[in-house]
Image (spheres, rainbow, N blue to C red):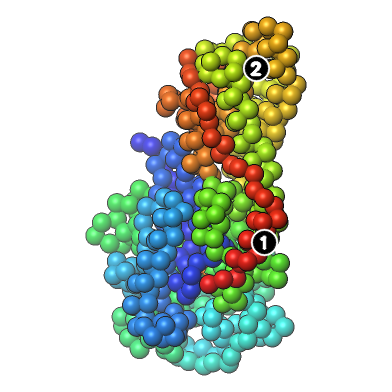
Amino acid sequence: MKETFYVTTPIYYPSGRFHIGTSYTTVLADSLKRLNELKGKDCYMLTGTDEHGQKIETVAEKNGLKPKEYVDKMADMAKELWKKMDIQYDDFIRTTDERHEKIVQKIFQIFLDKGDIYKGEYEGLYCIPCETYFTKTQLIDGKCPDCGREVVPMKEEAYFFNMKKYADKLLKYYDEHPDFIKPEFRKNEMINNFIKPGLEDLCVTRTSFDWGIKVPSDPKHVIYVWLDALTNYLTALGYLSDDDSLFEKYWPADVQVIGKDIARFHLIYWPIFLMALDLPLPKHIVVHNWIMMKDGKMSKSKGNVIYPETLIDRYGLDATKYFLLREVPVAQDGIFSPEAFVERYNFDLCNDLSNLLNRTVSMVNKYFQGKVEGYTGCINDVDKELEEFCITQINKFNELIDNFEIANSLQEIWNLIARTNKYIDETSPWILAKNDETEKLKSCIYHLIENLRKIAILIKPFMNETAENILNQIGIKDENLKTWESLNYYDKIKDIKVIEKGEPIFMRLNQEEEIEYLKKNMNQN
Ligand code: ME8
């Protein structure tokens, strides 16, 4: 049986059109799925929408729609976008799905029966957009610590989850599973900011609004969004349903990708819910930083956003994905700026990658009528060095990606691209051709084609179409030469023919024009 790999994105609030930040998380998860698929695993990816709560109720009303009508429309919008972005999710869960609602009620009842949920009264400072209560000490400058907006005093009868009961168990778990949270500094934030000062019990119901899943034994209470939302990762797999085969197969999740804004919910409450259900915890939770605009965090409510469609329609999907993954390191915020986008496009994609392919294909045509017969061994002095460099880069890539350092792992691929370009200058194939040094020339060409083959495989999880295009242009048709495993060998290409006239995969952009175009198209709804 194949090894399984289950990856999830957060379920997004359909409170507005999705911007590039939302797309970033999804692209990251999708890339991890594609990578593991390429490695031969049986993969399953889940995404979806978080459709209950006061915020959605209010937005629906503003749009003149009933909540359900509104979320139906928005879920379709999300699916359209993921289709455009070629996101290969296997299931799209909506918290309004009956399959989800039924199981959330069951889970709530299990917690009640166990005594983990109790009834009390909540009084606190409430952030309406985040749907979260805070204590005074948690506020930053008197405002919501998550979104920075005003909070209001509120009081209501409510059910609570006894988080305190699990605090020590959670700390022990963190300690025994150093790879659970990536990057590691997020774990320390949780310990120092929330657990050590004393974990508060979590309010898990509301009576102040209606749009949500009712507590079966006390229907004036609606199950508060976080218990409702977090359990989606289980209900989508059929947990506690008549058919739990997916759950049996894929749980625990291998990777759950989230943004730093929802770290507390996923690194504290979520593991505790799972402990209370006696379920294993996900193997890794990857917390990424944000894509910022120059004037701060991009957010649907602030309106300082760039939409993925703007970039995809003009520059293509792969360039858009490349920018996101390369410019926003998981552990640091990244900034979207038109200048940076155009620069990445022109330097990394056009100068480095596209030109390497173009130069290589045209040399094979010019010197060998487009044919590469087979491995020649290392004839030029630099051949061996290039082969060794290639092995080192692949090892570095693997190490980084295993640690979810995606931007850095892409950097290592681009180092390989740069080294391969330099190899052309070092071997000067045009001089070898002029001097009739055919064996040396053959070796040079073989090494270039082989490196391009490897580069294509390495970038495939992130830029599928570009990878396919490269493999097609260099005439790699044998499926065995497209596998992840084939990165281990150097000598298997035999009797291939490159394309006669390859189109450049990325054309140089006019810097000024494109910067202006992007500036004009930012912040537009
Ligand atoms: O929080 N940069 O939904 P949400 C990078 N429904 N990522 C960003 C981003 C930015 N500027 N803005 C948003 C919710 N994100 C809950 C989740 S899960 C059980 C429930 C991404 O629509 C990031 O992943 O507000 C963040 O965690 C997520 O969108 C928040 O999406």
Which labelled disc corresponds to residue 135?
none
Relative to 312, residue 165 above or below:
below
Q: Residue beneath label 1, please?
A: 516
Separation of residues labelled 1 and 2 (CA atoms): 42 Å
Residue 408 in view in this figure? no
Three-letter amino acid code of the residue under disc 1 = Glu
Query: Does ligand 1 reach within 8 Å of label 2's beta carbon?
Result: no
Relative to 216, residue 18 above or below:
above
Residue 214 in view in this figure? yes
Q: So how many labels did they put on this image?
A: 2
In terms of image quadrants, where is residue 210? bottom left
Q: Position of residue 258 (x, y in %)?
A: 54, 60
- The residue shown at (41%, 77%) is 52
Q: Is residue 181 left or right of residue 215?
A: right
Q: Residue beneath label 2, please?
A: 444
- The residue shown at (47%, 43%) is 34
**Label 2 neighbour load within 10 Å: few <14, some 14-19, many 20+:** many
Q: Nearer the viewer, residue 271 or 4?
A: 4
Q: Nearer the viewer, residue 179 or 496?
A: 496
Three-letter amino acid code of the residue under disc 2 = Cys
Q: Position of residue 472 (x, y in %)?
A: 47, 30
- The quarter of the rendering in which ligand 1 is drawn is bottom right
Quarter of the image that includes the N terminus:
top left
Q: Nearer the viewer, residue 99 or 364?
A: 364
Q: Position of residue 524 (x, y in %)?
A: 56, 71
- The residue shown at (56%, 14%) is 368
Relative to 391, residue 139 above or below:
below
In terms of image quadrants, where is residue 488? top right
